[in-house]
Image (cartoon, rainbow, N blue to C red):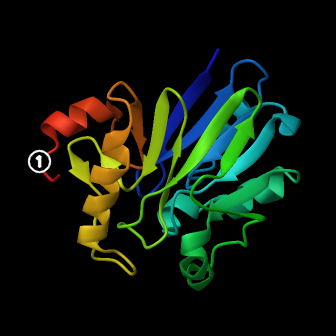
Amino acid sequence: MGLDIKCYMKGMYAENTYLITDEATGFKAVIDPGYFGTEVRFDIQNNAYLKYLLLTHAHHDHFLSVQQYLDEYSSVVFAAPEGDAELLRKSGCPEPKMLLREGDVITLGETELRVMETPGHTGGGICFVTDREVFTGDTLFKLSVGRTDLETGDWDTLMDSIKTKLYTLDDDLVVYPGHGLETTIGYEKKANPFV
């Protein structure tokens, strides 16, 4: 058993919103809730199964639809990176119920998502790591990396996060980025021209 992962590459910014489901229990979470559409609601099906909205960083294309999810699913817990708390407030994001930091673990049925702090694209960006996948937000893309010219971004910090954190993960881990197509840690270590 593992995760069933659905990606909705939709919305005005073509941001990747992920609906992940623990296959053993049916419990679900939405990672980077920038998109909210009828197909997402259909795939969630039972309101009681949606446990978390998980945010990788404080850019509005990734949290654009948080309020719609909160309005529709009253028991869902919105969790966001503690290091981006001030940026979230300034950006007009709804207030998270839970602030996440390095080493925190989100338990979704039988799946554990470990929080890894990967600042650089924003000052407090995080990734969610399982035994088979890593959800990298805008830190690492297929053959690219996140931009650092926006508020709290820093190129050297981003490179350090990728090299000393993400690139120490297993080569076979599948990377699910905030934009674009999936890849693997091993492929990016060999082929990514920016790192």
Q: Where is residue 186 in the image (x, y as percent from the top left)?
A: 26, 30
Q: Residue at x 37, y 30 (%)?
A: 170
Residue 181 quadrant: top left
In the structure shown, which secondary structural element does the residue marked by tag 1 occupy? loop
Query: Seen in the image, is 166 located left or right of residue 143?
Result: right
Is residue 62 placed above or below 181 in the rendered structure?
Answer: below
Q: Where is residue 77 in the image (x, y as percent from the top left)?
A: 79, 54
Furthest residue to the bottom?
90
- Residue 180 visible from this viewpoint: no
Q: Residues within 10 Å of mark 1 (few under 14, many from 20)?
A: few
Q: Which residue is drawn at 81% across and 52% down?
A: 72
Query: Seen in the image, is 157 located left or right of residue 45?
Result: left
Query: Seen in the image, is 148 located left or right of residue 22?
Result: left
Residue type indicated by callout 1: Pro
Q: Position of residue 31 (x, y in %)?
A: 59, 47
- Residue 29 visible from this viewpoint: yes
Q: Residue at x 73, y 54 (%)?
A: 69
- Quadrant where the N terminus lies? top right
Query: Seen in the image, is 192 located left or right of residue 185?
Result: left
Q: Residue at x 77, y 30 (%)?
A: 109
User: Residue at label 1?
Assistant: 193
Judging depth in this view, the residue of 173 and 144 nearest the camera is: 173
Residue 29 quadrant: top right
Judging depth in this view, the residue of 120 and 19 nearest the camera is: 120
Q: Where is residue 112 in the image (x, y as percent from the top left)?
A: 66, 35
